[in-house]
Image (cartoon, rainbow, N blue to C red):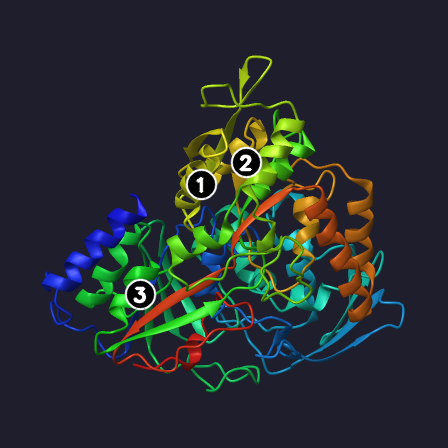
Amino acid sequence: MRLSEVVFLTTLVLATGAISACGSAPASLNQLNYGLTLVPTNIDPQVGASSELGIPLRSVYDTLVFRDAHGQFVPGLASRWEVSADGLTYTFFLRQDVRFQDGTPFNAEAVRINLERVLDPAIQSQKAAFMLGPLQSVEVIDPYTVRLHMKQPFAPLLDSLSQVYLGMASPAALAKWGNADYQFHQVGTGPFRFVEYLAGDHLTLERNPDYAWGPSTYQHRTAQVQQIVFRFYEDPASRVPALLSGEADVMGEVPPQDAAALSKKPGYSLLPTSIPGQPLQFFLNVTAPPTDDLQVRQALLEATDRGAIANSLFGGSSPPAQGPLDLSTWGAFPTIPLSLYHPDGSAQLLDQAGWRLPPGGGLRNKNGVPLELEIVAPPWGFSPQAAEALQAQWQSVGIAVHVTQVASITELSAAQAGGKYNLIADNFSDTDPDILRSFYSSGALDNLSKVQDAQLDRLLEQAASTLSASAREALYAQAEKRIADLALVIPVRDYVNLNMTRSPVKDLHFDYAGWFPILIDVSK
C-alpha cells in the first residue's frame, strides 16, 4: 500500500468517526495491549537480529550491565566489573540473589553457557555473535565471578553486553528445548515471564512476581501490569484503527500524518523517540554496472534531494540523514551533507562517465545501453516509498529506476546474496558505531555495497580495538568520510519512532537503544 493510500484511509477514519475511541470495551486494567509492526523470523534474541523482537523480550531478560538515559553503564546482573589495562580481560562480579523464572539459579556457569551458545555456529546467530567481537573464552572463577578473555581489545563489549541480544537465558530451558524450539519457551530473569508465542498472531508476557533485582534505570521494583499481549500490525493502515478501537493501547511506527492527526484527539499521546544506529538508507552495489563506476555513484548522491524526501514522507518528524550513522548515535558525523544536492553537478558527472542524454531527451545511454538501475526495498521503514521518491528524482536527470519490493527478511537476504541489484535498502539500530564494521568491512556478512577497501577495513578494525573514546571518535570520523568519498550509501532520514499511547496508559519510556520500552514502569 502506498503512503498516500494509508494517509487517505486514516484521514477518513478520523474525520468521519468510522471507528470510535469507545467502539469496543476497554481491556482489563491489568492487561496492556501492545502493537508490533514486524513479525521477526526468529524471536530468540541470541539468534535473531530484529529490533522488533527486543520490544517484548527486553523485559523477559536481564543483562550483565545496563545503560542509563545518558549512556552510562550501570550494574545489572553484574554488581560490578573490572577491565584489565590492556583491554584483554573483563571480570564480572555477579549478584547472588537472582533466579531465572523457572527457579534455576543465576550464576557464573549460566553466563558461560549463554556466551558459549552465542558463539556456537550451530545456532547461526545473526547479530549477538558479531557483538561479542574477538571473545576467546569464558572462564568461571568461582560461582559468582566470571572472566571474559579477548583475543584483542574490543571497545564495544560493554555496550554489547547491555543489549537484549546478549540477555541471560536459563541453562535448564536451553537444554530442555534445544536451539530450534527455545524461541517458543523462553526463560530469563526479567520483570516479565514469557507465556506463549504464536508466530504472526500474538506474544504474551506475564508479570514476574519474584522480580527484585532490577537496575537503577527502572523506576519500579516490580511490574505495574499483570499481563502484556503483543499483536502484529504490519500494514501501516491498521495501526491507528487499532488504537482508536481499543484493540491496542500502545503502537510503534505510526505513520507520520496519522500520528499528527491522532495526537490532537483527547486521550492519545505521541512519544517520538530517536533511534541510534543506521538511518533509512540505500546501499550502492560497487560490483554491479553501472554503480560499479564511482562517478555514477557520486552523481546519484548529487541527484538526491534528501530534505525533500524526508519532508514529503515524514512531515518533519524525522530529520534528513547526513551520513551512514543516525546523528543521534555516538560517533556519528555529517559526512554526506544536504548541501551535496546539485542536479547540474550530477548531470556533469554522468556526462563525464559517458552516460549522455539523447538529443530529443529521454534516458541517458552509453554505447546504446540505457542508464537503468535496480532498487530492492523491504516493506518496513518506508523503504518502498523512499525508493519511489528516488525513482522520481532521478528520472529528471535521465535515469530509469526499477523498484522491486521484497516481502520478508528472507527475501531480502536472498536478494543480497544474488547481488544483481544496484541499490538495496536495509538498516539496523545500534548504540555503538561499531555497527559500521558489519556493513562496510571486506567479507562482512552484511556488506551490502560489496565493497573491498583496505583503508576502510583498517579504520573500522582499529576503531573497534581502541579503548580511548576520543581516539575512537577520530577514527570513526575518518571511516565515515571514507564511506562518503566512495559513495557507498545514500542516507535518507534519521530514524525517529513515532510511538502512540491511548489513555489510561502512563509512564511509557524507552531505554538508551530507543526501540525498547521499559515495561516494568508502565501502568494503566
Q: Secondary structure at mark 2?
A: strand
Give, as a three-letter code, the residue at label 2.
Answer: Leu
Q: Residue at x 31, y 73 (%)?
A: 501
Quarter the N terminus occupies: top left
Q: Nearest the camera: 268 or 92?
A: 268
Q: As displayed, is residue 111 above or below residue 482?
A: below
**Mark pair 2, 3: CA separation:** 30 Å
Q: Residues within 10 Å of mark 1 (few under 14, many from 20)?
A: many
**Mark pair 1, 2: CA separation:** 9 Å
Q: Are marks 1 and 2 in contact (CB under 8 Å)?
A: yes
Percent x, y of residue 23: 11, 67
Q: Nearest the camera: 142 or 114?
A: 114
Evaluate whether residue 48 shows in this view. Answer: no
Q: Which residue is mark 2?
A: 423
Q: Upstream in the sequence, badge 2 or badge 3?
A: 3
Q: Nearest the camera: 157 or 16?
A: 16
Quarter the C terminus occupies: bottom left
Percent x, y of residue 245: 17, 65
Q: Which residue is mark 1?
A: 387
Q: Which residue is mark 3?
A: 259
Q: As displayed, is residue 330 above or below residue 411?
A: below
**Mark pair 1, 3: CA separation:** 22 Å
Q: Nearest the camera: 219 or 64?
A: 219
